[in-house]
Amino acid sequence: MTTSFPTSPTVVVTGAASLRGIGRATATRLAEHGWNVGLLDLDGGACADLAAELHDRFGVEAHGVGADVVDRGAVQAAVDELEAKLPPLTALANIAGVSSPVPYLELDADEWRRVMSINLDGVHNVSQRVAQSLVRSGVGRIVSLSSVSAQRGGGTFSKTPYSVAKAGVIGLMRSLARELGEFGVTANAIAPGPIDTDIMGGTLTDERKEELAEDLLIRRVGTPDDIGAAIEFLIGADAGWITGQTLNVDGGLYMH
């Protein structure tokens, strides 16, 4: 038996500190629309500053903590702190991640492990901890960022370990959807195309944007808010019958 969706929901957003990132844009969008926000990032100071800003601007409850998503103990402690400071958790947006443009034949073990641990193990660590709370409450949403690179085998900026990890995120969300559905918890992935953030090797020049847009049916690169809008829908009250899905938000790149 699932519980009704809360009137004052709370979302945990990972990877929220980057000034030009999807995490910050998503947290800001959600706070503007009435979500309480828990922010988790390696840079705890930036999370705390953003939390204070969102509280002041939008009047929602907000709290930021620092943690490495690869460290299970740190994740446990961070989510414990967010739960203590905020209304009950309703949703999780797994956004923290790193890129990797290293060609496969030049790839060493350290780079493989770095990318896999942050982009897949980190998503598992946070998802498992938050899922425990969502299952107890009887309602919840988990959304994690995959990538069109998982479906195309790269082809934008990052290469093999990134594509493998992001494919793993799709499998993880499908598995969580199957296991957690009976508890009223949904799990979905979003596969962005090229987004104008610094994860694509730094700030994109106009020339690079035009080059990337040539492969898109909608002739522009995406913005962080394009992804934030999709996350907002999938974690919202109206998306309770959508689970185990991968939503491509890519300007038509994968279809093209």
Image (cartoon, rainbow, N blue to C red):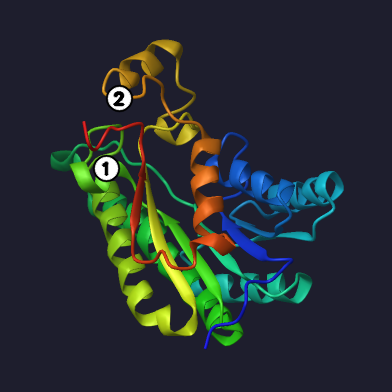
Q: Earlier in the sequence, mark 2 or mark 1?
A: 1
Find numbered disc 1 in the image and state the secondary structure of the residue it sits on: helix
Taking depth in this image into account, of 43 and 143 the one nearest to the observer is 143
Name the residue carrying label 2: 217
Is residue 107 in sight in this rendering? Answer: no
Residue 1 on image: x %, y %: 52, 89
Q: Residue furthest left?
A: 105
- Res 122 quadrant in image: bottom left
In front: 155, or 193? 193
Examine the rendered structure and indicate whether residue 50 appears above or below residue 252: below
Q: Where is residue 184? Give x, y as percent.
A: 49, 79
What's under tag 2, amino acid-wise? Answer: Leu
Q: Label 1 is placed on what type of residue? A: Ser
At a point 49% along the width and 32% down the height, the residue shown is: 197
Residue position marked by numbered label 1 in the rendering: 149
Residue 243: which quarter of the image? bottom left
Expressed as whole percent of the image width and height from the top left, the position of residue 151 reads 22, 47
